[in-house]
Image (cartoon, grey):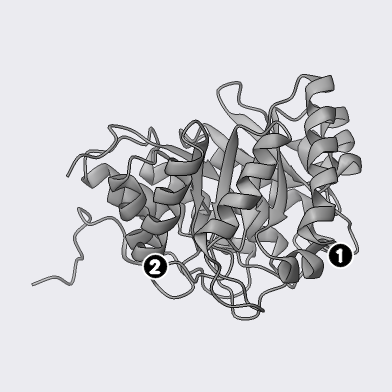
């Protein structure tokens, strides 16, 4: 088995994790979390989202959060945006990058942004144009790439079609979201194989949720296929506000713990990352699902052992 020597991890907890919280999270707590993550060795952090505050109340203070953090010059900070208005706000704020999102299915896209996939393509074009004008790179995100809470399984060919249309808008890197945790290793392999056959020059990012416990197995499958760019969320925060029962992303510390033990470099200091996870646990209601946060790294032996 040949694996990549190193991977890039984009931390999405400050956005994907916090936006899913039903209780308000203070601006100060968001800033503390991003600042803690910025000192872990992570090089990519999805810090905020410029979306409708009515739809996602916990992202209403995106500009205040961005203005309040201590920016690490070695970290690439990005924002998730749905349309030109969001892109203009991100450009005005001076983010390093943007992600524009669209679903693989009309049902989820209508639930999420009130438009069909076809209609949302004009938003993708406008975000790319806004980013180009501001000199800010734009990546794409396709949610429900492995399954839809309304329609069920999503065929790989359908995802490839949406990806092809995003490429036609000027996107060169696309993240594939397992929004409701429906991915399994077989489905991950099917999608990556289809993408490589049809869009060989497209850069892939995988965004796995651990709703049904297959998150790290899905990561391993993608690694075996040469993917070296993953999203993860500190503490395992996250979930879709539009998908019932959807739980958090793969926990960043669980991912780092596994990869480093496999001699796949992440550049992340696990102890610092666990400190950031404890910051998140301090303001998140309920226990975070991260396994390593609970049990500690494998080399940290229990005092009760033996």
* Total numbered circles: 2
Q: Is residue 33 visible to us here?
A: no
Q: Which mark is residue 128?
A: none
Residue depicted at 22% across the width and 46% down the height:
261
> Gap in Å between the C-alphas at discs 1 and 2?
29 Å
Counting residues from the start of the chain, the first of labels 1 and 2 encountered is 1
Position of the N terminus, as image quadrant, is top left
In the rendered structure, the answer to whether residue 230 lies left or right of residue 246 reads: left
- Numbered disc 2: secondary structure: loop
Rendering coords of residue 102 (x, y %): 72, 53
Of 139 and 252, nearer the camera is 139
Q: Is residue 177 above or below residue 95?
A: below
Residue named by callout 2:
184
Residue depicted at 38% across the width and 45% down the height:
271
Residue depicted at 61% across the width and 46% down the height:
163
Q: Counting other residues with Cα less than 10 Å from the Cα at mark 1, is it few (<14), some (14-19), or many (20 or more)?
A: few
Of 108 and 45, nearer the camera is 108
Rendering coords of residue 110 (x, y %): 81, 67
- Numbered disc 1: secondary structure: loop
Which quadrant holds residue 59? bottom right
Of 166 and 37, nearer the camera is 166
Residue named by callout 1:
114
């Amino acid at each position: 088995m040949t694996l990549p020597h190193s991977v890039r991890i984009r931390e999405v907890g400050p956005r994907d994790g916090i936006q899913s919280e039903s209780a308000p999270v203070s601006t100060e707590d968001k800033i503390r979390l991003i600042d803690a993550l910025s000192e872990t060795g992570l090089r990519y952090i999805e810090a905020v989202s410029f979306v409708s505050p009515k739809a996602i109340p916990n992202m209403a203070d995106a500009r205040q959060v961005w203005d309040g953090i201590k920016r690490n010059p070695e970290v690439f900070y990005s924002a998730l945006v749905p349309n030109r208005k969001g892109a203009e706000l991100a450009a005005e704020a001076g983010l390093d990058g943007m992600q524009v999102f669209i679903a693989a299915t009309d049902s989820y896209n209508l639930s999420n942004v009130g438009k069909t996939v076809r209609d949302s393509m004009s938003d993708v074009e406008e975000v790319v144009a806004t980013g180009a004008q501001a000199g800010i790179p734009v990546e794409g995100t396709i949610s429900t790439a492995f399954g839809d809470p309304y329609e069920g399984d999503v065929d790989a060919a359908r995802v490839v079609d949406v990806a092809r249309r995003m490429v036609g808008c000027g996107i060169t890197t696309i993240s594939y979201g397992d929004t409701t945790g429906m991915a399994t290793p077989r489905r991950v392999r099917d999608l990556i194989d289809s993408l490589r056959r049809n869009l060989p020059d497209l850069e892939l990012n995988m965004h796995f949720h651990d709703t049904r416990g297959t998150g790290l197995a899905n990561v391993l499958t993608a690694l075996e296929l040469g993917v070296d760019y993953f999203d993860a969320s500190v503490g395992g925060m996250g979930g879709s506000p539009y998908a019932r029962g959807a739980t958090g992303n793969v926990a960043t510390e669980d991912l780092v713990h596994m990869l480093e033990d496999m001699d796949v470099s992440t550049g992340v200091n696990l102890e610092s990352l666990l400190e950031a996870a404890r910051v998140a646990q301090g303001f998140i209601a309920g226990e975070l699902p991260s396994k390593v946060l609970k049990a500690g790294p494998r080399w940290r032996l229990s005092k009760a052992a033996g």
